[in-house]
Image (cartoon, helix red, strand yellow):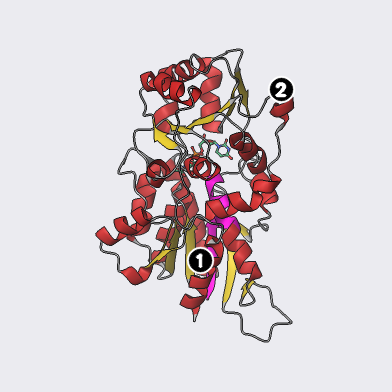
Amino acid sequence: MHIDIIAGARPNFMKIAPIIEAIRHSPFTTRSGERDANSEQRTALSYRLIHTGQHYDKKMSADFFEQLGIPEPDVNLNARSGTQAEQTARIMTRYEKLLLEAPVDLCLVVGDVTSTMACSIVAKKMSMKVAHVEAGIRSHDLSMPEEINRMVTDSITDYFFTTSEVANTNLRKAGIPEERIFFVGNTMIDTLLKNRPRFTPPPIWEEAQLEKGRYLVMTMHRPANVDEEQKLKAFMEAILNNVEDLPVIFPVHPRTGKILDRLGIEAKHLRLIGPLPYLEFNYLVEHSKAVLTDSGGITEETTVMGVPCLTLRDNTERPETITQGTNELVGTDPANIAPALRRVFSGNWKTGSIPEKWDGGTGERIVEVLLRLSR
Ligand code: UD1
């Protein structure tokens, strides 16, 4: 079976790394175009890595490939910036052209970004199978582009690889037959557990003389939170006024950076820095007092590392990070931030436990299923 593995934006890269690693370690697999001269066995699975180019800055893309040991993509569709429709259209037309020239049997997409949806539609319309890693999760919030991407992708997916029982239940409720749901765990956590011993302090550690447990990390990039300048300003003020003057380290996503520049927020304990590479970012998170974020993936990582996480959203597609993990929905009303931070500082934050199958073996489980499907 020939498969395409699709990656387009930053949160995709940590999800594909363990799948590619497991494929490379299997004696039954190879990369498209490669011949395993020593192998007597017929290769059951070959893969091609497609980068859509949705994220293209070194700090948003190449740094992750390098640190996570992901091989150079076979093809880069160079989608780059634009509106959601422009990006979707560019990815779709370019991926279609590629598949016309060199079709595959299955297209494997991960997560919920524009690239996930765009490539799955193209492949399905060309009668190829679609596998979705991180299928079945739902925020039920259609103001988030990611939710639309999840719904569209899952509506045409053939093989659903899931991270949680909640996702399995969502899919069953949608009428997906049991034999197409594979509860394999979380590839993002494979990457976290594998790389945890390699986490390394970023330059800001020395510069700001940070100490373990004596600073906070924040990230914010969701359009609903950052595109309205006054809302972003109110968030920042509520945070900065309630952190007992501990440093707040904010690695800024390009979308947020453009807006923060205009707002000109300054506080002596706020440190705005550029996007960090994977190993540096997670070093900061692992040793922080708490994280404030509107990301979904970070709530999974903080759950596994046992770090208090305050989610600045009204909903989540990852409820297990709340019911089992260290995450709480603080919401989008800045007035909720002070009481939540008080609980962090008084030591009254929950400790949490690690969800089932978030154990580092998900990439291998996915490849086992793919090999079964290819026979
Ligand atoms: C995307 C994903 C989101 C994910 C986020 C993480 C979708 C719908 N959203 O949102 O799920 O959490 O990535 O990073 O796919 N830009 C750069 N350099 C880059 C990439 C983007 O400057 O390498 C700029 C773009 O020009 C644009 C902004 O950042 O102005 C947003 O990028 P875009 O890919 O549209 O979506 P994200 O907000 O990054």
Locate residue 129, reporting x and y percent: 42, 69
Locate residue 172, reporting x and y percent: 28, 61
Vertical relation: 268 (above or below) 189: above
Q: Residue visible at 60% across and 51% down?
A: 193
| Marks 1 and 2, the one that precedes in the sequence | 2
Tell me: 21 left or right of 243: right
- The crowding category of the residue bearing disc 1, from other C-alpha atoms within 10 Å (few below 14, some 14 to 19, many at least 20), is many
Q: Where does label 1 land, which residue?
A: 366
The residue furthest front is 347
Label 1 element class: helix
- Circles 1 and 2 in contact, beta carbons < 8 Å: no
Q: Residue visible at 56% across and 45% down?
A: 10
The residue furthest bottom is 40
Which tag is nearer the camera, tag 1 or tag 2? Answer: 2
Locate residue 325, reporting x and y percent: 44, 42
Locate residue 226, reporting x and y percent: 45, 27
Ligand 1 is within 8 Å of the C-beta of the residue at disc 1: no
- Please give the range of residues in magenta: 1-17
The kind of residue on which mark 1 rests is Ile
Distance in Å between CA atoms under marks 1 and 2: 42 Å
Q: Where does label 2 land, which residue?
A: 209
Label 2 element class: loop
Tell me, for residue 260, which label it has, or none. Answer: none
Whether residue 11 appears in magenta in the rendering, the answer is yes
Q: Residue visible at 48% across and 49% down?
A: 354
> In terms of depth relative to the viewer, which is nearer, 107 or 201?
201
The kind of residue on which mark 2 rests is Gln
